[in-house]
Amino acid sequence: MKNIITIFAILIFGTIYSQTDQNGNPVFNSIITSEQVFDEYDLVSNYYTLENNIENKNSSVYISENPTLDKVEKFATELPSDFFLITKNQQMLNMILIISKPKMTFVVMDMATNKQSEYNFKLRGDITENRANEIIKINYDTDAEIKRGKLYFNNKKFRIISNADINRAVLSLINKEELGKSNSSEVKILSQEELKKIILIETKEGGKLDYFTEIKGQEYDGIQIKPGVFSTKLGMALYQWGRANFENGVNTLEDAYKIFSEFKERELNQREKEYIKLGFNKELEK
């Protein structure tokens, strides 16, 4: 998923981002929020998070490890929040992104042709529901609250555009412009369930995500990761496994925990969780 999204980001935003991945694409981390199945197509809803972006030095939209409320507000209201993938038989048809500035607009990309089109965004509001909820969750502003469809944050009031309204508007756009009938592209996307199955297979002995077999009997040998930072071979293997989960599109850290727990057929211990988290968030590379 992460690799697919960078395709859209580079075409939409060009070279405005200073931080790029190894392929030169901008890094703007996201999560899947829902998957809907219809007769002619599937719709995957996604959200560009505040967390793991504005405080993440590997992100193209990095601001600061401790961003001010004004900076959080600017990010939350000006940068894209929600986007949608239209797929059929795991192949991408179109992508829909809600652009906030200079005015809210639907930008649609045909993934087979890379053609972009813009459509009116008729919903009224200042901030999406996903963004408003995350601002409250992360607790940037201890006085922030959501009341009667409005977010009170940084001594200001923002009208919230609900997820339900956005979803209806997206479905209406898809139906009106027949976006679910576009030609399939060569870009494929797996469901989270299908991705989990592949990761479980590849984590087994000899698989591409098997970082563990080669260190059997040496798990607790010490190694230096970088100057002044030491760990064990097992810790580094767990780090690599967590990082691979993120790079391959596992949606959240909790999902990665569940996959490794299923692989081990037991609950994870705290050490395992800590190293998988470090890898998933690429903490040693910041």
Image (cartoon, rainbow, N blue to C red):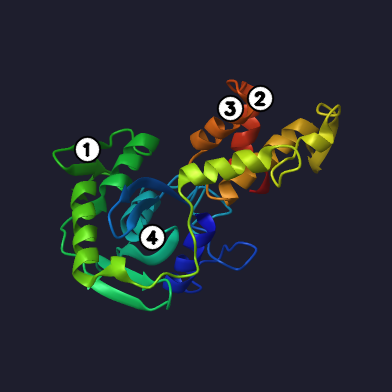
Is label 1 or label 3 in front? 3
Q: Secondary structure at mark 2?
A: helix
Mark 1: few, some, or many residues within 10 Å (few <14, many ≥20)?
some
Q: Disc 3 to disc 4, how far (Cα)?
A: 30 Å
Asked if the residue at tag 2 contacts the one at tag 4, i.e. Cβ–Cβ closer than 8 Å, the answer is no
Give the mark nearest the N terminus, 4 or 2.
4
Which residue does the numbered mark 2 point to in the structure image?
A: 271
Instruction: Indicate left or right for 94 with 231 as reference.
Output: left
- Label annotation for residue 137: none
Residue 23 position in % (x across, y down): 62, 67
Q: Which SS class for mark 1?
A: strand
Q: Is residue 80 above or below residue 191?
A: below
Residue labelled with disc 1: 146
Q: Label 4, on which residue?
A: 87
Q: Nearer the viewer, mark 3 or mark 2?
A: 3
Report which residue position mark 3 lands on: 261
- Left/right placement of residue 243 relative to residue 82 reads right
| Mark 4 residue type | Thr
Amino acid type at circle 3 is Ser
Is 155 in front, or is 49?
49
The quarter of the picture where residue 141 lies is: top left
- Circles 1, 3 touching at the beta carbon (< 8 Å): no
> What element does badge 4 sit on?
strand
Q: Distance from label 3 to label 2 (Cα)? A: 13 Å
Instruction: Give the residue displayed 32% in from the left and 59% down from the top.
Output: 41
Please, which residue is most extreme toward the left here? 148
Q: Nearer the viewer, residue 30 or 206?
A: 206
